[in-house]
């Protein structure tokens, strides 16, 4: 159930985008995130860090998108800011996967080197005991 609650603003964003375009979708996502936080606070429930981060990111980048739509800035596409959120998220997940892959690869190499050293020590020890 938590996954549906967390993805509600994103789902509403895509529905509103199909219906009214990027600016309606942005406003809908901001409203949905705000409504989520207010609902949790009124019900005296714990507000997860993911909900707060999602709210801040959507409100910040969505607000900048709506602001630049109403107050155009030369050389800046008004939809630039709302597009940053998914791009940064995908980049962050990719970097996490690469880091975990490199870390696991390093740990496997370290473990294999440890095994090689142990095997060499065992063979040296066997060689010494055979001589005695």
Image (spheres, helix red, strand yellow):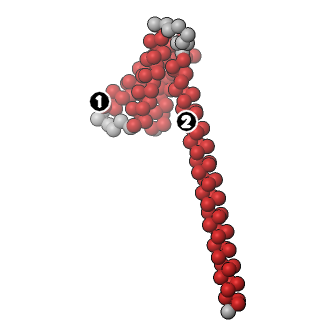
What is the distance, in whole Å, between disc 1 and disc 2 at their CAs?
Answer: 33 Å
Q: Is residue 32 visible?
A: no
| Labels 1 and 2: the sequence-earlier one | 1
The x, y position of residue 96, in whole percent, is 56, 42
Taking the image as shown, residue 82 lies to the left or right of residue 120, namely left
The x, y position of residue 84, in whole percent, is 53, 24
Asked if residue 103 is positioned above or below residue 117 in the image, the reply reads above
Which residue occupies the foreground of this view, 65 or 36? 65
Which residue occupies the foreground of this view, 23 or 129? 129
Which residue occupies the foreground of this view, 114 or 1? 114
Q: Which residue is depicted at the point 65% across and 76% down?
A: 121
Q: Is residue 68 visible?
A: yes
Q: Say if mark 1 contacts mark 2, CB within 8 Å.
A: no
Q: Which residue is depicted at the point 70% across and 89% down?
A: 130
Asked if residue 82 is positioned above or below residue 49 in the image, the reply reads above
Which residue is tagged 2?
92
Q: How many marks?
A: 2
Q: Residues within 10 Å of mark 2 (few under 14, many from 20)?
A: few
Q: Which residue is depicted at the point 38% across and 37% down?
A: 48
Q: Examine the image and state in which quarter residue 77 appears.
A: top right
Judged from the image, the secondary structure of the residue bearing numbered disc 1 is helix
């Amino acid at each position: 159930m938590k996954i549906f609650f967390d993805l509600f603003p994103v789902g509403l964003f895509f529905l509103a985008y199909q219906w009214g375009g990027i600016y309606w979708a942005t406003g809908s996502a901001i409203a949905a995130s705000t409504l989520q936080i207010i609902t949790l606070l009124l019900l005296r429930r714990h507000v997860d860090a993911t909900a707060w981060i999602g709210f801040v990111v959507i409100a910040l980048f969505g607000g900048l998108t709506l602001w630049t739509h109403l107050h155009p800035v030369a050389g800046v596409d008004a939809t630039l800011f709302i597009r940053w959120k998914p791009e940064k998220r995908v980049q962050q997940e990719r970097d996490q996967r690469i880091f975990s892959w490199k870390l696991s690869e390093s740990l496997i190499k370290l473990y294999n080197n440890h095994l090689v050293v142990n095997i060499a020590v065992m063979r040296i020890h066997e060689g010494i005991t055979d001589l005695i």
